[in-house]
Each structure stands twice: as C-alpha cells, then as structure tokens.
Image (tube, grey):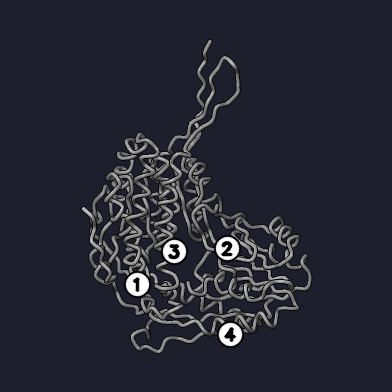
Amino acid sequence: MPIDLILDPSVLAKELSGYHLINGKLVAPKNGKTFDVLNPATGKVIGQAADGDADDVAIAVAAAKAAQKDWAERPARERGKLLAECGRILMSHAEELGRLVALESGKALRTESRVEASVLADMFVFFGGLASELKGETVPFNPNMMTLTTREAVGVVGAIIPWNVPMMLMAIKVAPALVAGNAVVVKSAEDTPLAVLRVCQIMQEVLPAGVFNILSGFGPSCGGPLVEHKDVKKVSFTGSVETGRTVYRAAAEKLIPVTLELGGKSPMIVMGDADLDKAIAGAIGGMRFTRQGQSCTAASRMLVHESLHDEFVKRLIDKVNTLKMGDPLDEETDIGTIINRKQFDKVCGYIEVGEKEGATKNELSALPTDSALSDGLFVRPVIFTNVDPNARIAREEIFGPVACVFKFKTFEEALELANDSDFGLAATVWTTDLKTALVATKRLEAGFVQVNQNLVVQPNLSYGGIKLSGLGKEASLESMLEHFTYKKTIILNME
C-alpha cells in the first residue's frame, strides 16, 4: 500500500520516533532506549531515535543474511527495475523528505535540502539502470578450456553514514550494493536519523523484506558491533579520519573490504586569467556556504593569483554578505545552522584560533533576528585573509563556514600550496588557458578535480579521495563492480 505524503515535518518526525526498520517493519530497540533528536535552529526536541546496540545489530544482520540469497538469485535487471522504481517513488516524496531533513539537520530547504532529496532519488534510478553491467569476461587462457569470470554479490553490507548529507550519502552506498545483489544494514548518524529512516520505510513498498534495514544509535554501541559482526562482509563508511581508522582496524581483523570517505581540505586555484564572475560563483558554491561549510569537498583553501586577489576577496565578501541566515524551512533562507552544539563549539574555536594565529577575519552575513531562533546554532560565515599556510585553520578540516584565501605569484607556487595537505579529496582550477588546466588536472593530488566549476557529488561521477581522504570510489559503475561484488574465475576443461 502506498505511503501517504506527510508534508509537516514535525508530524512526520513524531511518527518515526523511537524505531529502527528491520525486516520490512518499524521496530523498537530491544533495550527500549531512545535519545532525543533536536532541531538545531531552535534547540527544541523534534522526536526520538532508537538507541540501538549489539542486540539490534544481530537481529538486523540476521534478517539481511536471510533475505540476501533470494535477492541475489533474482535476475539482475529485475533488481535494477525495482531500484529504479524506488527512485521514482522517492522523487514523489522529495518535498516531504527535503522538509524533514531540513528540520533535523538545520540545512536550508530551498538551497540544500530539496536538492539533496532529488539527488537521492536520482541515485537509485541511475544504479537501477546499471544492473545489466554486472557481467563477467571470457579469458583466452587455453583453447581446450572455457575460462570465464562472473561477478558475485559479497553478501551483507554494513553502511555507516554521516549527518551532513545523510540521504544522498546513504544512497551512494545502498543503491549500488542492492543492485549488485547484496543486502544492507545502515547505521544512521545520531543527529539525522529520521529522514533516512523515512527513505527506508518508503522503499519497503518495493523491496523484499530484509534486503534494506536501518538502525540508529551511537558509534561505539551500534556502529562498532555492525562493523565487527561476523556476517557483515563489506563495510562502507563516511565520516571523520579518526573514526575511519577505527572502522578500518575492526574490518582488518575480519579481512573484509572497506570503502572510506574521510573528509578534505580542498584547494581552489584561481589563475590570473580566470573569469572572475565564474570564480566568485564557484567559490560560493564550492565552499558550500549554503550548507554552512559542512561538506567534505568544501573549497576551504582559496589560492588566488596576486593580480586578482584583492578584487576576488572584495567581491567574495560582497556576495556572501547577501546570503540570508534564518529558519531552514523558510523559503527566503540561504544559510541554516551548524548541526549540533559540539560542532558549533568546534567551529567557533577554530575562528578564535585563526585570529590568534594572526589571520585577518572577515565575518559576514548577519545572524537571524527572529526570537524563535535565539537558541539556534547559527555561525556567521568567515573568510580569513593573510593566513600562514602552516596555520591550523589552513591545514585542519574545520567542517564549518570558514574559508582561507591565499595569494600566490606563480603557477608552480599555487600547485605546491594546493598539494601541501594531508588530504586529497577534491580540487578545482579556474583558468581560460587549456595548457594550464591540463597540467593542473594532472598534477593536483586529489581524487575529484574540476576546471571552471565546482559540482557536488552526482550519479555517474566517480567520487573518492587519496591520502587521508580515504579509500575507494563511490557514485559510479566502478563503485558497484569493485566494491560490492567479487570476481569469480571459472574454468571448464573441454578435453
């Protein structure tokens, strides 16, 4: 039976409160515990999340394991059609999902949350269409032997997702895993458990019970047991470097494959011949100011040629000052809130550190004046200039609306500054010279490099980093084949 649309996110949050989704049904946690979910724009409780633990993990993994065999035996194109149908149904719920994720995450509905909901749906349609690509090869090994390879599902996949773009980042794990014939157990982020739970609930209209399950809870008590469970054969994690290392160590004990997306400190190189209008728009979008800078690919290091530096800074400041901060559900709002108090304090702490390190602070936009938002976790965007490249704000991932602008003289200097980072997720270069663009794309140490644009993750764009930014690729055919299947070699002796 189709699920009714519920456009009031407060009502929907209450309906979903206190549940996991296991084996096709909303179920309470075995321990009966829950924790509050807050609206970061007001500080008020909007609902509760199930506080899952190892017992819930065991039930969910058992359900996934039981469902996976039959799911994998379905023709691949049939699985693909079901995934594509999920995408179409999710698109019909896009407004509902956008409003719910705006309520729990603090991201503005117009500029961020609706976009995420549509990309979520598109991701399932995209991977549904790739089902026919789950094919092997014939190998010319010996004329008297038929040698071929097949692609086999790995089994039960454990996926741990972050809070900044929870629906979309869940989709780039769940969609390829499912179409490849796996069953999935997701552990949601503590701050944003409700919208992803709704996504899973909606997809139960189409999917067999047990194929897609979702738990909420905390990392040590729920995420840890999921990674360590003996029947979980693959883990995909997006989050911090520190937690990523913990996940990697636990998976290594079982010798299972892992995909890790762990963040970045992405450079944006603006050459002296760049189209300044495009570069300013790229800086606004690339820094993800409308997501409060809470993005792994945020262009938080802007390297600008000395001939354009002053004008670039002036125009960037003017543009950011036009962005309106306010209620995330207000159609006029451009910028919402930081996700939680801990992250709010971290971002504010980095801003203080930047000033102490001698950088020039430009604090922009304006805090909302609505008294209903007085307890909201709003942070004004900050652009630092005169930054020492070795300063903490220049080297550490802040995950907030804080950007550093640097001045350079030569292309070589820009490349050296760009690559002088422990991270290697994304990078952009802005130039009208083809040779400069080609050299930059070759030499920039990042897994996702763009010229004269700064797109976010999209279906069919292979996405993933190097260095401390992680291991493996997502959002592409490559991710489905290499990370959610294993290759089996088969030899038939015809003599």
For residue 462, above or below residue 362: above
Q: For label 3, count other residues whose C-alpha is less than 10 Å away and answer few (under 14), some (14-19) or many (20+).
A: many
The image quarter in which residue 265 lies: bottom right
Report helix, strand or loop for mark 4.
helix
For residue 447, above or below residue 157: below
Amino acid carrying mark 3 in the image: Val
Which residue bears the numbered disc 2? 264
Residue at (31, 66) in percent of width and height: 96
| C-alpha separation, residue under disc 1 versus residue under disc 3 | 13 Å
Amino acid carrying mark 1 in the image: Leu
Q: Is residue 59 left or right of residue 117?
A: left
* Proximity of marks 1 and 2: CB atoms separated by less than 8 Å: no
Which residue bears the numbered disc 3? 165
Which residue bears the numbered disc 1? 103
Q: Mark 2 or mark 4: which comes first in sequence?
A: 2
Amino acid carrying mark 4 in the image: Asp
| C-alpha separation, residue under disc 2 versus residue under disc 3 | 15 Å
